[in-house]
Image: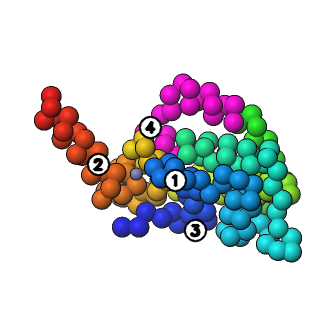
């Protein structure tokens, strides 16, 4: 079963998964990596007007990504330890992404990024998260409970009980581990 999030939330899922913790790779390791990803996903215009990312914006992007991963872990019932929470607070202080609220006649509030370039693109990611909080899909975007994985997946199950990015891999590994622990104990 595909564990892909619906609509624009897939973009947030893909953003979190730009870091593959298990493989130790990160598409956002360099400013050029971030620029390329934003253009590829339609969050920033390509040539002749590509985004120009500086080191500070790259830090902001990574801080945002890791904050979102922590929230997705919380959606999976996994709560960050104190060190992770402190790192997150420090990251949050660096975010400073400005959003403007717009009040529609239909009684809805929408948020729009009040920024340009890379910061505008990151603001857009944040507005998708707000939209998903609003329509109830956010709580289904989870990070895999396997500590060495933490891959973002969308829990399509009826009772929202999914814990693993894919049963074939992480879920089975966890089962084997607890089986071995039972055998040993
Ligand atoms: Zn996993």
**Marks 2 and 1 in Cβ contact (< 8 Å):** no
Q: Examine the structure image and report whether residue 79 is included in the region drawn in magenta.
A: yes
Q: Quadrant of the C terminus?
A: top left
The residue pinned by badge 4 equals 78
The residue pinned by badge 3 equals 7
Query: Could you give the CA–CA distance between mark 3 and mark 2, rounded to whole angstroms?
Result: 30 Å
**Which structural element holds mark 2?**
helix
- Asked where in the image residue 178 lies, by quadrant, the reply is top left
Establish whether ligand 1 lies closer than 8 Å to the Cβ of label 4. Answer: no
From the viewer's perspective, is the residue at label 4 or at label 1 nearer?
A: 1
Query: Could you give the CA–CA distance between mark 3 and mark 4, rounded to whole angstroms?
Result: 25 Å
- Residue drawn at (59%, 53%) of the image: 26
The residue lying furthest to the top in this view is 82
- Residue drawn at (69%, 59%) of the image: 33
Question: Horizontal placement of 185 versus 156: left or right?
Answer: left
Q: Is residue 126 visible?
A: no
Q: How is the image coloured?
A: rainbow
Q: Position of residue 21 (x, y in %)?
A: 50, 48
**Marks 4 and 2 in Cβ contact (< 8 Å):** no
Query: Could you give the CA–CA distance between mark 2 and mark 1, rounded to whole angstroms?
Result: 18 Å
Q: Earlier in the sequence, mark 2 or mark 1?
A: 1
Question: Horizontal placement of 97 versus 26: left or right?
Answer: right
Q: Position of residue 183 (x, y in %)?
A: 13, 35
The residue pinned by badge 1 equals 20
Say above or below: 25 vs 67: below
Q: Earlier in the sequence, mark 4 or mark 2?
A: 4
The local crowd at label 4, few if under 14, some if 14 to 19, many if 20 or more residues have their Cα within 10 Å, is some
The residue pinned by badge 2 equals 173
**Which structural element holds mark 1?**
strand
Specify the segment rendered in magenta: 71-91
**Marks 4 and 1 in Cβ contact (< 8 Å):** no
């Amino acid at each position: 079963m595909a564990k892909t999030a619906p609509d624009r939330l897939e973009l947030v899922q893909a953003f979190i998964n730009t870091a593959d913790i298990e493989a130790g790779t990160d598409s956002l390791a360099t400013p050029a990596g971030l620029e390329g990803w934003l253009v590829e996903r339609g969050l920033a215009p390509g040539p002749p007007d590509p985004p120009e990312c500086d080191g500070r914006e790259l830090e902001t992007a990574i801080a945002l990504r890791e904050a979102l991963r922590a929230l997705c872990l919380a959606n999976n019932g996994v709560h960050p330890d104190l060190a992770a929470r402190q790192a997150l607070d420090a990251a949050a202080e660096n975010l400073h992404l400005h959003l403007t609220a717009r009040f529609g006649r239909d009684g809805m509030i929408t948020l729009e990024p009040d920024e340009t370039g890379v910061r505008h693109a990151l603001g857009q990611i944040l507005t998708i998260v707000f939209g998903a909080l609003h329509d109830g899909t956010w709580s289904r975007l989870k990070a895999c409970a396997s500590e060495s994985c933490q891959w973002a997946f969308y829990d399509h199950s009826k009772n929202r009980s999914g814990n693993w990015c894919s049963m074939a891999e992480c879920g089975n590994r966890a089962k084997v581990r607890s089986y071995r622990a039972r055998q040993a104990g």
